[in-house]
Amino acid sequence: MCGIVGYIGPRQAAGLLVDGLRRMEYRGYDSAGLAIVNGHGVEVVKAAGKLDNLEQRLQGATPTGTLGIGHTRWATHGAPTTTNAHPHTDQSGRIAVIHNGIIENAGALRKALEGRGHVFKSETDTEVLAHLVGELYAGNLEEAVAAALRDVDGAYGLAFVSADEPGVLVAARKGSPLLVGVGDGEFFVASDASALLEHTRSVVYLDDGEMAVLSRDGYRIRNLETDFIDKPVNQIEWDLATIERGGFDHFMLKEIFEQPESLENTLRGHLLDDEGSARVHGLNMTDDELKQINRIVITACGTSWHSALIGEYMLEELARIPVEVEYASEFRYRNPVVDEKTLVIAISQSGETADTLAAIHEAKLRGARTLGLVNVVGSTIAREVDGGLYLRAGPEVGVASTKAFTSQVAALTLVTLRLARLRNLGIMQGRAIIEGLRKIPAQIRQILDRAHEIEALADQFWQSNNALYLGRGVNFPVALEGALKLKEISYIHAEGYPAAEMKHGPIALIDENMPVVFIAPKDTVYGKIVSNIEEVKARGGRVIAIVNERDADMARLTDFCFVIPTTLNVLTPLLTIIPLQLFSYYVALRRGCNVDQPRNLAKSVTVE
Ligand code: M6R
């Protein structure tokens, strides 16, 4: 995610802003910039890449001034270039803005502004906000921002400054965190308390729909309807390390808990409720081209490979297109059957995985059209594919992938909807899937609210040496992913299987020491899963079940039963995986493992 910091007070702003940005480095970013208001107007300095690059540009050329805004960007619209870096300015160059989030109607607003003569420099949604506020500006920045926000759809944390008001900073929040730092005769805004902790521990947290107007004498909170809201000043008691992880003990836990929000970001702007379909412009393919696809190959590694298996299930079930899922590391060594009629989809959180990149090269050599479902904007895979979809899950720091997985599954659902609605899927079925998708973030929150139940479960099982994960249909890949999560961070040997495969071998492992995790929401094969559970119970195995109904069979057969909210069968992986992620985390914690950096693993595997 991006980082925002702003300052108004008696001190020189530039150095304070860079220090604040440095404090937010752990969040990950691809470019940085700042804007300082002084007698010369608004001076903007930006640089792609690390903060060091920005500091180099500032050397000997640091703008002076005691009001400014600074930003680290994690790209969601447009490549991570200097031009796309924030701050962005309006047509006059006198108003500057920094932004976290995604403006959903940026395309329409930009078109309208261009029609009125505005010329844009960047590809970002943020620049649209600068132009909009600039157009509405009549000597009062606060009112121009409030008026502009009435026309804006989407999520934002924003900070604006204007050369014509050197004593005012205006900030606004909707769906992206923002707080005001109250210092001694100086005031800050930041998306993250770590950016201002060095200067003050007194903060006011903005809620969605609120704006903050900062001056040299004080600050005022308002919303679009009223111009004053009384808000408490809170004292931050956490230390810096805790704040960087958003109050969580580990990045992995933070990222597990971010999933309602990261999924909302993945879905934002793509769902066409009335048509029961998805808008996926990034595919860069016409309806006719999409209709001509007669085979899809999905290639990926690790967790991304598991989401690919879920994609296979969805695409075959709903779009009726034959799909093959290939380990990217195997793809180019086995003379794959791929030609110009095949669509090859690469899935990658980092966009830098060497095997996945090599598979894409191979697919291109064979004439296939390639798409990428990638989280990191501007990464190598994202640049090399013919089209695709960004996951917009935000930076994933924990080596064990969690929020990227659910965003990959959501993105695959969008691609499936798009292809399926051009084929056999009826509008009502499409609408039902969209309705289901819209409920998922809140349903994940319900599960996360019960994390303590999973923590208690981990207390019972953390000393196990082996675990078996079993699921069927769309939840078989969830069994694989659950097992991978457990083994990579707790070093417990864990395996995932289709539940009915158990009797062909793994059943030999079952005794009273073997926890067996069943992923068993009620679906067409539920009765068969119950029989598999009976087989485990008969051999003394300990059964953990993830279900959406604790019926009499589950009450009788399971040692622990976690009930998830009900959703459509194809969407269940988005919910069933959450307790399994939490289980791995709490088990690893009890075993004293380094959760965020498990041994021998790297976040991005850039070697073959
Ligand atoms: O960045 P990618 O999605 O391409 O990475 C693929 C795998 O290396 C990755 O999913 C790995 O398996 C994770 N450690 C899983 O938690």
Image: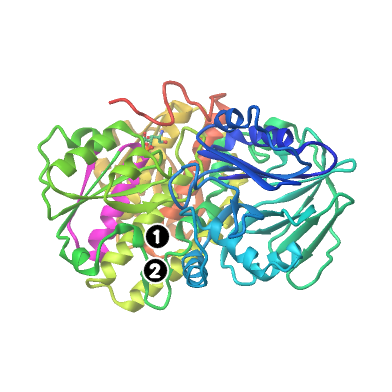
Determine which of the numbered discs, if any, sits on residue 579 in the image.
Answer: none
In the rendered image, the vertical position of residue 533 relative to residue 419, given as above or below? above
In the rendered image, the vertical position of residue 72 relative to residue 157, given as above or below? above
Residue visible at 24% across and 69% down in the picture:
287
Instruction: Give how far across and how far down residue 426 sits, in percent.
Output: 29, 76
Q: Amino acid at mark 2?
A: Ile
Q: Is residue 266 magenta?
A: no
Front in this rendered view, residue 167 or 51: 167
Instruction: Give how far across and how far down residue 84 sits, in percent.
Output: 50, 48
Front in this rendered view, residue 248 or 505: 248
Mark 1: secondary structure: helix
Instruction: Give how far across and how far down residue 336 sits, in percent.
Output: 12, 41
Q: Which residues are magenta?
A: 301-327
> Residue 510 sits in which quadrant?
top left
State left or right for residue 598 relative to residue 419.
Answer: right
State left or right for residue 563 relative to residue 40.
Answer: left
Q: Amino acid at mark 1?
A: Leu
Q: Identify the image's colour scheme: rainbow, by chain, secondary structure or one colour.
A: rainbow
> Residue 95 sits in which quadrant?
bottom right
Residue linked to disc 2:
433
For mark 1, does the 10 Å Cα neighbourhood hold few (<14), some (14 to 19), or many (20 or more) residues?
Answer: many
Distance, label 2 to label 1, CA atoms, is 8 Å
Instruction: Give how far across and how far down residue 71 sits, in percent.
Output: 62, 43
Q: Is residue 309 magenta?
A: yes
Residue linked to disc 1:
571
Q: For the stretch drawn in magenta, what is the main secondary structure?
A: helix
Judged from the image, the quadrant occupied by ligand 1 is top left
Mark 2 touches mark 1? (CB < 8 Å): yes
In the rendered image, the vertical position of residue 139 relative to residue 11, given as above or below? below
